Amino acid sequence: MILSPLTRRALMGGVLALGGLAALGRRPVAGQEGQAIRLAAGEVARRLLPDQPQPSMLRLYNETVMPVVRLQRGVPAALTLENGLPDEHTTIHWHGLRIPNAMDGVPYVTQPPVEPGEAFTYRFTPPDAGTFFFHPHCNTVEQLGRGLGGVLIVDGDAPQPFDADLALAYKDWDLNDDGTLGPFLTLRGAAGPGTFGSLKTVNGTPVTDDACPVYEVPAGADLRLRVLNLDNTRLLRIAVEGAESWMIATDGMPLAPLALNFWNLGPAMRVDLAVRTPDEEGTEILVQNLRAAVPVVLARLKVVGGPLGRAGKAPPALSVPFVPEPDLADAPTLRMVFSSAPGPSEPPAELADLPFADTLCLAPRTLWAINAQTWPEDGHAHPPAPLAVLDRGRSYVLQLENISKHTHPIHLHGHSFKVLSSSTDPDLPVHWADTTLLGPGERRQVALLADNPGDWMFHCHIIEHQETGMMGIVRVA
Ligand SMILES: [Cu+2]
């Protein structure tokens, strides 16, 4: 197979800081060049911390930690995955994109796995603009754990350009003292809340008690701040201190500007914020994670230059979503119950106390279930019967019920759904999502128009839960 050479123009420096401002902490951006983009998956030896004794063996696209791909809504794109991994197959799933099933990147289910040395070109026309991401859908716990993932921004939803545009991609790394990574799947983690990494990063830059990435932003301006939780495990509660902020999109789908108090981001979830920066040069804005014993500063935004005069104006709104509205009057309700795997006992709690629980890498695949069905170990090659078969063109309400003691961010491929209500959070705004966070004992009602035919994965995005059973297929036919 002939692989196209990487062109200089396909890689652009700088981090989405518009208006002539260069952001600190630069990283390459895979840009749009007729929307033909190459993503080479490979192993890279790199130090995540400068004082690591040995580099870590990362697995990255284009040798870049969380590269940013920018596409234009409505313009056909061709994205070629080259598998340069030495020892395992891979694919790319385009998380949140409502694209044809054959491009969804689930090995065996939607395409053959891409073996080492092979390539596969994903061709689709992005139907929505917004903030998305991409990652493998095989051995995800380790491939994403070692870094295979990226930010996908689809332009075309902002009627007026923002003064600046910044993406913050959050990820932990399970970094050991000797530079090795892992274990990525432990019995204690899989049976509990997941295995937490020891090193927090934003855009690949360490986040510690006294350090985090710093970016320059224009004064008196409207900043579009895209926050992505690309971690396997950690739940974030995003808040902004030092500037007026509004939520303008959830999981890529526009929302009428809503003053931000905080927003919970489970793994795979995104929120777009409009941040009205102060007029005073030198002011600092803190982007924080409040879901911690002490708030964690994820990024500092330093205000520079003269004010651009946005103070006092209405917050900038995005275009209305392109996703079709479900018809609630004609929508049957389907229950989806998330639980530990059925059995005579509660295996997760008991297994987590075993002495090898912290080190076991090969966990049983039967810890978690959806509607009492667990995803089998060979499920990709031999998928089980669908959890539900939806009539194409019909609307449905899914009643999502978490009867377990842990939180689960639940993701459906190929569709966006409207989150209508929560049994535990009456103030939850109605919003679009592709991943919704269910707390212990919580019920949520979501609605969708089943307009995209195919077998779609439906799973928890705490990857250890996904890989130990909490996954199934929803068929639209
Ligand atoms: Cu889960």
Image (tube, helix red, strand yellow):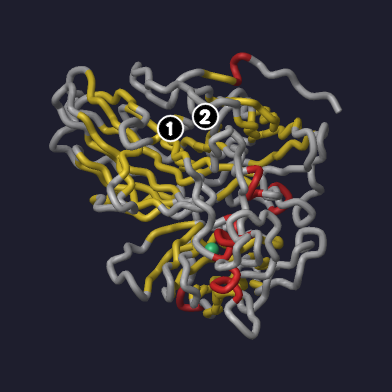
Q: Secondary structure at mark 1?
A: strand
Q: Residue at image x 30%, y 53%?
A: 293
Label 2 to label 1: alpha-carbon separation: 8 Å
Q: Is disc 2 in contact with disc 1, using a CB cutoff of under 8 Å? A: yes
Q: In the displayed structure, does residue 49 sit left or right of residue 288? A: right
Q: Position of residue 229 (x, y in %)?
A: 46, 46
* Residue type pointed to by label 1: Pro
Give the quarter of the figure containing the C terminus. bottom right
Tally the numbered discs: 2
Residue indicated by mark 1: 206
For residue 397, say whether it is visible: no
Label 1 lies in ligand 1 vicinity (Cβ under 8 Å): no
Location of residue 85 with respect to 414 vertically, above or below: above
Q: Quadrant of residue 38?
A: top right
Q: In the displayed structure, does residue 336 sit left or right of residue 456? A: left
Residue indicated by mark 2: 48
For residue 215, say whether it is visible: yes
Q: Position of residue 142 (x, y in %)?
A: 65, 46
Task: Give the class, few, some or many, for how many residues have Cα within 10 Å of label 1's Cα (few <14, many ≥20).
Answer: many
* Residue type pointed to by label 2: Leu
Q: Quadrant of residue 109?
A: bottom right
Q: Quadrant of ligand 1?
A: bottom right
The residue lying toward the viewer, choosing from 230 and 219, is 230
Q: Secondary structure at mark 2?
A: loop
Location of residue 276 with respect to 103 vertically, above or below: above
